[in-house]
Amino acid sequence: MKKTLKTQKMVAVLALILLYIFFSIFGDNFFQYSTLVSIFDSSYYIGFMAIGVTFVIITGGIDLSIGTVCICCSLIGGTLFEKGVPMAAVLIIILVIGTLIGVANGLMVSVMGLPAFIATLGTMMITRGFGSIVTGTATVTFPQGDVAGAWFHNIFKFKTASLPAGIPTGFILLIIMAVLMAVILNKTRPGRYILALGSNKEATRLSGVNVVKWETLAYTFSGFFAALAGISYAAVYSTLMPGTGNGFELDAIAGVVIGGTSLSGGNGSISGTLIGVFIMAVLKTGLPFVGLQPHYQLFITGFVLIFAVFADVLNRRKAASV
């Protein structure tokens, strides 16, 4: 299966390169620095969500709530800031809320025995509604410019006079978190147990592994990174509307699957997930440059996703027959 995953990642890398070349040739002014910054901007929130949900999908589960958790946590944080809470405390609170939601999802799946689809679908509805309740359906705007608290924007984009498009510092944070989580997944006992859960949950339990603990940890990672995605979204776009976020999870999950992680569980990588995420970001950014609106991304991504899953099915059949 490792050989299969490596092959899928190589195909994804080739697809990413070809996409960038295609838009550079046929897109009007696509090949420029400001466009590259736009690609990074649209990859942060998808990327963070995708890193977290990779762990869940590797266990054989799914987390449909990450999109609404992303926005809900930021709406709560923005509301607290408007009430006078310092930005540093707001960012910590956002991460804590997301992490606790992840723990709740994990417990519903691992302890209560709810199907992951139903548990996280319920959480999706709850967080989408709760964000609207907290804000009173009002739009929340995070501080910009030289206003107190606006410093957190520099974490993801540092603007200078010489580069009006800004320096995409968020890319550095995304890579650091990806490397950290890749080490956890591949080089630590929690990561090995999470991989084992996806391969054969019952056999893992019978071998003495605390299945509840490690399955809950996977969803906890997902909740934490959904909250981090919310911070990055607020930093890049500033304005958040209650009731939004539904659909973000599809981009993240698509990126994970395109990157080679199997929906059947037991197999996946963080590096592959990042490649899949950048394929999504290049598609989203590049389509308008060739005269197509961004909603064509859904149409095209649907075909890409079906192809990626079908390739995984064929590979698993081939591996089973050997």
Image: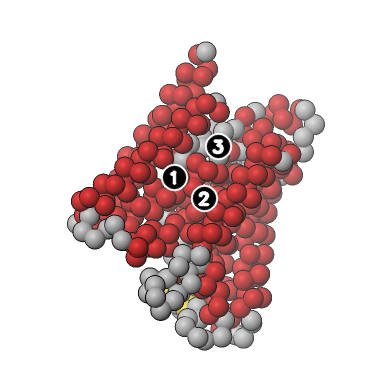
Q: Kindly identify the residue that appears in the image at 51 percent across and 65 percent down.
A: 169
Rendered position, 81 above or below 201: below
Answer above or below: position of 133 versus 202: below
Residue 206: image x %, image y %? 76, 27
Decide if residue 232 is in sight here.
yes
Q: Residues within 10 Å of mark 1 (few under 14, many from 20)?
A: many
Tag 1 secondary structure: helix
Query: Camera-side residue: 76 or 181?
Result: 181
- Give the residue pinned by disc 1: 276
Across and down, in percent, residue 317 comes to 47, 20
Describe the element under mark 3 as helix, strand or loop.
loop
Q: Does residue 201 appear left or right of residue 73 in this picture?
A: right
Horizontal and vertical percent for residue 36?
37, 59
Residue lying at 58% horizontally and 38% vertically, measured from the top left: 58
Circle 3 residue:
268
What whole-number distance in Å separates the C-alpha atoms at marks 2 and 3?
12 Å
Query: Can the viewer see residue 197 in this picture?
Result: no
Say which residue appears at 55% left-offset and 37% top-offset.
Answer: 268
**Amino acid type indicated by mark 1:** Gly
Q: Please report contact status of discs 2 and 1: CB closer than 8 Å, yes or no.
A: yes
Position of residue 110 measured from the top left corner of the image (x, y, whole percent): 68, 43
Vertical order, 261 against 118 (above or below): above
Q: Earlier in the sequence, mark 1 or mark 3?
A: 3
- In the rendered structure, find residue 50 and report the number of the disc placed on it: 2
- Residue nearest the observer in this picture, 271 or 296: 271
Q: Quadrant of the N terminus?
A: top right
Residues under numbered marks 2 and 3 in contact, where contact means CB atoms less than 8 Å apart: no
Task: Answer whether labels 1 and 3 touch (C-beta < 8 Å).
Answer: no
